[in-house]
């Protein structure tokens, strides 16, 4: 009978040095000793990827995306071989494989490719021979044998995609925190660890800036019904947080968590003519340049000039590109001005329990008002309310919302690492 397959994923901090790699080897072997077949996905060691990006930019301020993929994919190549060696040193059979060897196929797009399919033949063969398979996260290969990467933080996506392709029993994402918290415990030390969270909530939290999982990995897990666990690489006995279908949960809270995204920019396009096709022109131009838009507001028309202002948020990384694209529309559409501001943050309250429970938005706005925090934009989904605030108000906003929705625990969370000053 075929054994259950468990896919484990260890991020950069978990494989940052030789001692930590030994620790990962122990966690892998432990799962193998539990009687499972194990596929381990790893990221590049520590800050390797950042370091590679930095070097590339020093050599060429405008590096070609193909060469960036050639470069960045090397980071994971180092960690898979080292981990396989560490596992072998403990007397277990292990084999490292990269995306090309396996056939982790992606679209023909560099630096943010999507996985199209995974050939499991080689993986199944190695597993059937009793080997622990160590797979390079973050990378893929096109039909034309070009190396691609999935976007920063993409190893989570690799892990879930492998779990889906192999019909794994579970995908365990090991990290330096003990699970998913009601908010970042570095900001609110009494944040509570959640035992369970639904895919839908996790997706909203991840998109809202909770850095624990890549949103695309949660989306893939939801589509393929892969149960995921976020757990600590250092406390292997702790079960962390299970992420599963909302239908399997009993929801007794309105708000599950508070997240903040500090990496957005607010763009305002002023004086857009109030006529059909104007908004479409703006957002089509952005979409054609692969710039995703998050919150959108179109203001009341200026009756005299017969124009609208359209404000929206995008990833701050895309600011220069967006300004270029939008300035290019100015003449044709008679747009008066395009402005960008990166001194903002999006703070969101997320909870599947919001559905059918009135008053959550008003409670949120009132709490922010009481704390004298100005709301600059608002967006909602069925299970999320987001407010754009000034960056300097981020921590305060998180704290008051965490309090008002009664998310505190009685314990102080054990926090690994501090929040970099420039992060908030
Ligand atoms: N090493 C890649 C990055 O830093 C992928 C990952 O960590 O998941 O973005
Ligand atoms: Mg990383």
Image (cartoon, rainbow, N blue to C red):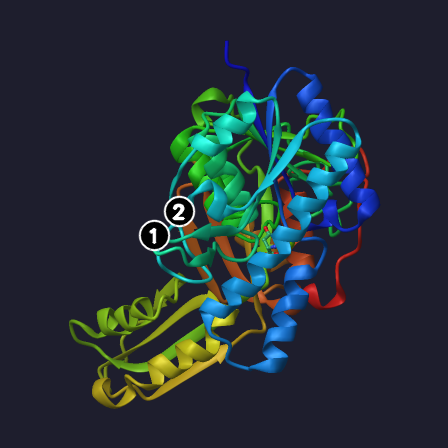
Depth order, front residue of 197/228: 228
Residue identified by numbered label 2: 105
Residue 286, quarter of picture: bottom left
Q: Secondary structure at mark 2?
A: strand
* Residue at the spot 34% in from the left edge and 52% down from the top edge: 143
The answer to whether residue 270 is above or below residue 221 is below
Residue pushed farthest top?
1
* Residue at the spot 53% in from the left edge and 48% down from the top edge: 214
The mark nearer the N terminus, 2 or 1, is 2
* Residue at the spot 75% in from the left edge and 58% down from the top edge: 419
The answer to whether residue 312 is above or below residue 371 is below
Question: How packed is label 1: few (under 14 Cα within 10 Å), some, or many (20 or more)?
Answer: few
Q: Secondary structure at mark 1?
A: loop
Residue 194's disc is none
Q: Is residue 64 visible to us here? A: yes
Residue 61, quarter of picture: bottom right
Residue identified by numbered label 1: 143
Is 181 positioned to the left or the right of 300 in the image?
Answer: right
Name the spot of residue 34 as percent of width and height, x first.
Answer: 68, 16
Q: Report how many numbered discs are placed on residues in the image.
A: 2
> Does the residue at mark 2 contact the one at mark 1 (Cβ under 8 Å)?
yes
* Residue at the spot 68% in from the left edge and 28% down from the top edge: 93
Depth order, front residue of 340/27: 27
Work out which quarter of the rendered image holds the C terminus and state it. bottom right
Q: Is residue 424 visible to us here? A: no
Which numbered mark, 2 or 1, is in the foreground of this view?
1
Question: What's the distance in space between the residues labelled 2 and 1, CA to CA?
Answer: 7 Å
Name the spot of residue 292 as percent of width and height, x first.
Answer: 39, 63
Quadrant of the image where one finds ligand 1: bottom right
Depth order, front residue of 225/249: 225
């Amino acid at each position: 009978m075929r054994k259950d397959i468990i896919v484990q994923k260890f991020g950069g901090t978990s494989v940052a040095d030789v001692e930590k790699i030994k620790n990962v080897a122990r966690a892998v072997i432990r799962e193998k000793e539990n009687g499972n077949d194990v596929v381990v996905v790893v990221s590049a060691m520590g800050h390797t990827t950042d370091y590679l990006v930095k070097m590339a930019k020093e050599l060429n301020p405008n590096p070609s995306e193909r060469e960036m993929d050639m470069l960045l994919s090397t980071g994971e190549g180092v960690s898979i071989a080292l981990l396989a060696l560490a596992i072998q040193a403990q007397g277990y059979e292990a084999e490292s494989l990269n995306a090309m060897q396996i056939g982790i196929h992606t679209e023909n797009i560099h630096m943010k490719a999507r996985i199209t399919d995974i050939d499991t033949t080689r993986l199944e063969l190695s597993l059937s021979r009793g080997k622990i398979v160590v797979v390079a996260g973050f990378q893929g290969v096109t039909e034309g044998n070009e190396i691609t990467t999935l976007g920063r933080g993409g190893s989570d996506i690799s892990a879930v995609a492998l779990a889906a392709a192999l019909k794994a029993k579970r995908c365990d994402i090991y990290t330096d925190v003990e699970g998913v918290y009601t908010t970042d415990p570095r900001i609110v030390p009494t944040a509570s660890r959640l035992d369970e969270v639904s895919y839908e909530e996790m997706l909203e939290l991840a998109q809202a800036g909770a850095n624990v999982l890549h949103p695309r990995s949660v989306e893939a897990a939801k589509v393929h019904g892969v149960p995921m666990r976020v757990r600590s690489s250092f406390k292997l006995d702790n079960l962390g947080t299970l992420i599963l279908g909302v239908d399997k949960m009993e929801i007794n809270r309105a708000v599950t968590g508070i997240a903040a995204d500090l990496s957005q920019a607010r763009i305002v396009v002023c004086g857009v003519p109030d006529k059909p096709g104007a908004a479409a022109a703006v957002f089509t131009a952005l979409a054609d340049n692969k710039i995703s838009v998050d919150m959108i507001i179109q203001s009341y028309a200026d009756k005299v000039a017969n124009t609208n202002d359209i404000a929206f948020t995008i990833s701050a990384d895309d600011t220069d590109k967006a300004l270029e694209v939008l300035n290019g529309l100015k003449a044709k559409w008679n747009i008066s001005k395009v402005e960008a501001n990166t001194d903002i943050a999006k703070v969101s309250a997320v909870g599947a329990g919001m559905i059918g429970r009135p008053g959550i938005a008003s409670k949120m706005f009132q709490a922010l008002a009481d704390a004298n925090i100005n709301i600059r934009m608002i967006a909602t989904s069925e299970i999320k309310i987001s407010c754009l605030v000034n960056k300097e108000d981020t921590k305060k906003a998180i704290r008051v919302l965490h309090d008002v929705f009664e998310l505190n625990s009685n314990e102080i969370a054990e926090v690994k690492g501090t929040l970099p000053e420039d992060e908030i």
